[in-house]
Amino acid sequence: MLNFDKEKYLQVTGGAVNLRGRIEAVIDEVSDKGYENVFLIGIGGTIAAMYPFEYMLKSNSTIPVYAEIAAEFSVMGHKHFSENSLVILYSLSGTTPETVAAAEYCKEKGATTIGLVGELGTPLADAVDYPIANYAENDFGGDSSAIQLYLLIFRLMYKRDSFPHYEKFADELVTIPDQLISVKEQGEAQAEAFAEKYKDEKYHIFTGAGNLWGKTYSYAMCVLEEMQWIRTKSIHAAEFFHGTLEIVDEETSIVVVKGEDETRPLLERVENFGETYTNKLTIFDTADFELSGISQEFRKYLSPLIMNTFLQRVSVHLEDKRGHSLEKRRYYRKVEY
Amino acid sequence: MLNFDKEKYLQVTGGAVNLRGRIEAVIDEVSDKGYENVFLIGIGGTIAAMYPFEYMLKSNSTIPVYAEIAAEFSVMGHKHFSENSLVILYSLSGTTPETVAAAEYCKEKGATTIGLVGELGTPLADAVDYPIANYAENDFGGDSSAIQLYLLIFRLMYKRDSFPHYEKFADELVTIPDQLISVKEQGEAQAEAFAEKYKDEKYHIFTGAGNLWGKTYSYAMCVLEEMQWIRTKSIHAAEFFHGTLEIVDEETSIVVVKGEDETRPLLERVENFGETYTNKLTIFDTADFELSGISQEFRKYLSPLIMNTFLQRVSVHLEDKRGHSLEKRRYYRKVEY
């Protein structure tokens, strides 16, 4: 596969699955200590990485959960937040100022904090009670953090009697790195064809729902906008029909980001609309991928990870076909603002 | 003012403030009965109308609150939802299928439901325990529902000891219709100038935060996209810096939707960025408007209503300058999908 370093990928994702013991020990400790609610905090791609888990907590567990954008969380005076809150923060670099500030705010208030980072010794790692570190770069950081968040959140649910199948789920999850490579291979032709067909497209509507809404939002923003400088609208599939549909004509690109949870019919509705009203409809569907080691009952939870690993291939091909490096920035970490 | 029917406006907003007694009686009854949490449900413009109140509940009260998109809520199996939930739903027509379906789902589960509608006898009104009706059309429906939601939500907080100033707040709120007309008059020149300057603009970035995020999102989607067929990106001000900023060049329109709550510095940051990197920066700021009968301490809560009434003037001028009726649709309620 183009620009794919298999060894590096297995090192990153292998590092993530190898954190199982550490993560379970942390979650068991904080669960035994007790907490009132869970806050999931990040900004940009990292808050978007939390949204699937907010959704899955809401739809599987009575643990109260709030996913909040770091910079807003630090000023809003959230009345559910207290020293009895359990906070999970994520910054791959460990240096994102808004997320580090949120962690420091949490520390002042006496909440229990867990931080996902790429490296120990970074400001976020130093600001939290329980740093969890696995080295990754932008390309594979999403898969790495997703694996860790599955272990964290599903273990939390297990400890609250909300997800009795945790052991089986985790046993299967730790086998996933090789299967994710297979997903990339299965999706390679579609990823390349999409990049070729749409390399000159100036605007896309990305739509998703349920546990794929976060990925839909962040792929549009963090890859197409940030890394490729292409305009996008990301819109929840149910919301699409209450405004955004009116800008669609037969030349409007609509990308349906389709997973396997209970919101799938919402995506099918957009798909049906798109089939009639545009010539530029793309369906990215996790159901198209075989996963040899994952039980059918768990597939729906894993859609965000499957979609993420596939979309990373789309990014690589967009970079290639468009001659626009994924690392190129005008502003971010280049100028002050 | 262009296309402004003052008498009709005062009838609609007067109708909303006159519901104070009815709303307080309903809220006192459901509060005395008790509830575990509050669900705010709508779709498109109506879920966006709930977001300010979700934010204000979180930042002022320990009442657990979940704002959910109607169509997703009905399928997701939300584990916090039960017969002990208090649900507030909103559909101006009373016929929005997704919201009516959500109300019926709530009824089946035995939750307590309040429905905001334009008319009694509509499906949503018939599906809820407590219908609250005030006739309005699209133009003034946003102001009408906001007034009702302030009374509903702030009374709820008052009954939970989260907002002791309710009586003073409500006494001031019921005087607001005339002040909102004054806001429209104060903003008229800016509204017309914006419409003139940007009548041919093909794409806008709208950014907001805190209790104005919902309005930012819905103005972009429900007015610019749905009613004017102009492409938009709506992006939370804190999120802007984690992706969307990279598509900005000096010809990119950025509209900063600025209110008076604690997230104001997040908007100022986008404003500073925009001043440097684009020639097309617009600031819509509720702080620019005088409100003769509202205490300073309450202004921040009312930003969504103030902004809504101002933006309605922007819509009228866009319609006029662009020669594109706000009622024109390609698909919505015109074709099946």
Image (cartoon, coloured by chain):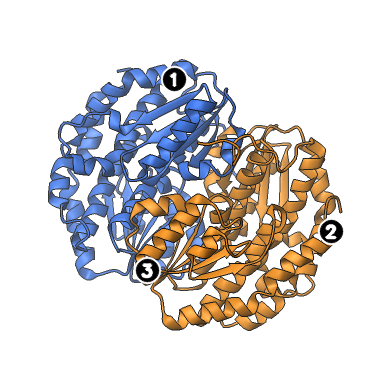
Chain colours: A orange, B blue
Asked whether the viewer can see residue B144, the reply is yes
Say which residue appears at 66% left-offset and 73% top-offset: A298
Query: Gap in Å between the C-alphas at discs 3 and 1?
Result: 49 Å
Query: Disc 1 marks which residue?
Result: B195
Type of amino acid at the residue the image marks with label 2: Glu
Q: Is A38 rendered above or below residue B128? A: below
Q: Is residue B298 left or right of residue A83?
A: left
Query: Disc 2 marks which residue?
Result: A185
Query: Disc 3 marks which residue?
Result: A110
Image quadrant assignment for residue A275: top right
User: Could you say which is closer to the camera, residue A231 or residue A7?
Assistant: A7
Type of amino acid at the residue the image marks with label 1: Ala
Chain under numbered label 3: A
Mark 3: which secondary structure?
A: loop
Quick check: marks 3 and 2 in contact, CB under 8 Å? no
Image quadrant assignment for residue A235: top right
Co-location on one chain, circles 3 and 2 = yes
